Image (cartoon, rainbow, N blue to C red):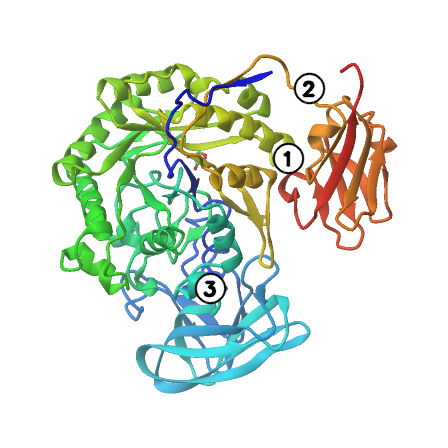
Amino acid sequence: AITVDPSAKGAAIDDTMYGVFFEDINRAADGGLYAELVQNRSFEYSTADNGSYTPLTSWAVGGTAEVVNDSGRLNARNRNYLSLGAGSSVTNAGYNTGIRVDKGKRYDFSVWARAESGSTLTVSLKDTAGTLGTARQVAVKGGWAKYKATFTATRTSNRGRLAVAARNAAALDEVSLFPRDTYKNQPNGLRKDLAEKIAALKPGFVRFPGGCLVNTGSMEDYSEASNWQRKRSYQWKDTIGPVEERATNANFWGYNQSYGLGYYEYFRLSGDIGAMPLPVVPALVTGCGQNKATDDDALLKRHIQDTLDLIEFANGPATSTWGKARAKMGHPKPFHLTHIGVGNEENLPKEFFARFQQFRAAIEAKYPDITVISNSGPDDAGTTFDTAWQLNREGNVDMVDEHYYNSPNWFLQNNDRYDSYDRKGPKVFLGEYASQGNAWKNGLSEAAFMTGLERNADIVKLASYAPLLANEDYVQWRPDMVWFNNRASWNSANYEVQKLFMTNVGDRVVPSKATTTPNVSGPITGAVGLSTWATSAAYDDVKVTSADGSTLLSDDFSGDASKWTSSGRGSWSVQDGQYVQTDTATENTMVTAGDRAWKDYDLHVKATKKSGK
Ligand code: AHR
């Protein structure tokens, strides 16, 4: 029985409680949310990013073309450019299977080019079946200048290529192709389907830009030319201003990041979806397995000043130095920053906390209303985590960022995790969590766990599933909430759980108690994934039907896949212990195939609970 006392007052739940954590991992930014269709647009890919890269990665050359790094460059922060010979061409392959274009839609091409004695560029969009839009001629003359052209796609294709051919020799840089149709039609904007999936969650906050990519690598900045190809910690000043002046960087996750999706765009996205922006800055103690803390006081001070400048960039008047930079980019009004995270998963709690205190003191002295969020390091269920928490408690920290990834069972068993947290201590920002998988049972275990977060909403103030996005052809981390390729995106069961909670945030918890195991009996119908059912022998007469009512599957639920019968639409198999159906018409796998769960299907399950269980 469930006892509910409507007169008892449980914790108040903040509107901002559930948010999203965006990290540029799994090509979540370039090749993902950032709508740019050209890969390696400024010829900066290098072996420092990834051993398999060259400055011509994703480009094919016809004739003569050479990537050059000399004083003839576009600007000091964009080292390489392409020297294209007379009568030669280069062709970009985009991401995944190629550049995706939709018939009738417009695509904006731009390039920085230099041709002292004049040249004509022929720009074309095509795939192996032929042209995808009328080719454009661009006359180039003199020093570096930006040139533009627009295409209207005459066919839909997932395998598009962008080719640029030069009549006479020319230098090229920052070759770009953007869909006109971006989220909220913003320039330098975001891929619509992905941004819409994020917006549909109605996130209370957006944590960005990571994750491990925040504070690993060299702590130096770009200003030293010798640092240009080194993996530098993520520094927000590298990511604003004109895109051709954003010095690309080696991403922690093994690829190059253009920073086309940078701090301005993160703040803009947060505003566009009504979420609180929550940036995380490096603390100068590297986490994520690289245990290094800087002893360079001047460097530490510079990073602290950068953090103060960031707050001014977000909130300062358009007349202030950094407020002016924001206004120049198109947003004179402030972005309303109220919370900032310092550091991510540092494994050296004492070294981290000493530096955190310096950040906090400087921020609070200038911006007393900003909440400065500390870190607990990864939850290793041991001394690092405990030491970090002890330091945070003793140091009267406002809020601590916790991270953990565990099995579904762990999530079921730890529903009471926060019941015993010290109410006088720091509040919790659960900045990263996920059960290990994208199947129905994972979503279900997270839902069960989230009831515990919500019951403790007086102490757990913010929570975000992690990571958010994954391009299926460039995966460094799984599970992820939303999956995509160059032509489609699809939600996981975990996404549906987040959405359920995020779009139904209550005002207050009504305390309740369950005294027996809930007894499920009779037919159960719903649009659900199947793994929970498949791992349970508790159900009889299972029938799975599609939206049109045709039977896809029926079984007595003995747990043996070979006994399952399916309709003519596909074949069933067991992969990684989960039931997977491959649809013969589309070749999509469906139901509980990990990453692809829930894609495009509306399934209905009907089952009867076995008696006596
Ligand atoms: O979410 C993926 C990674 O997990 C994050 O980068 C890191 O903070 C954690 O270890």
Q: Give residue 524's position: percent from left, percent from top.
A: 73, 32
Mark 1–mark 2 CB contact (< 8 Å) = no
Considering the numbered disc 3 on the image, is that residue within a helix, a strand or a loop? loop
Label 1 is placed on what type of residue?
A: Ala
Q: Is residue 64 visible?
A: yes
How many other residues sit within 10 Å of disc 1, few (<14), some (14-19) or many (≥20)? Answer: many
Disc 1: which residue? 439
In the rendered image, which residue does mark 2 sit on? 519
What x and y, as percent, mark residue 37? 50, 64
At label 3, the amino acid type is Thr
Q: Quadrant of the N terminus?
A: top right
How far apart are the two marked residues, 1 and 2, measured between alpha carbons? 23 Å
- Return the residue at label 3: 182
Residue 231 visible in the picture: no
How far across and down, in percent of the image, does residue 19 sit? 42, 40
Please report whichever mark, 3 or 1, sits nearer to the chain's N-terminal start. Answer: 3
Q: Which secondary structure, mark 1?
A: loop
State which mark lies toward you, 2 or 3. Answer: 2
Q: Residues within 10 Å of mark 3 (few under 14, many from 20)?
A: some
* Above/below status of 403 relative to 127: above
Q: Is residue 274 left or right of residue 444?
A: left
Residue at the (80%, 51%) spot, across then down: 584
Mark positioned earlier in the residue sequence (2 or 3): 3
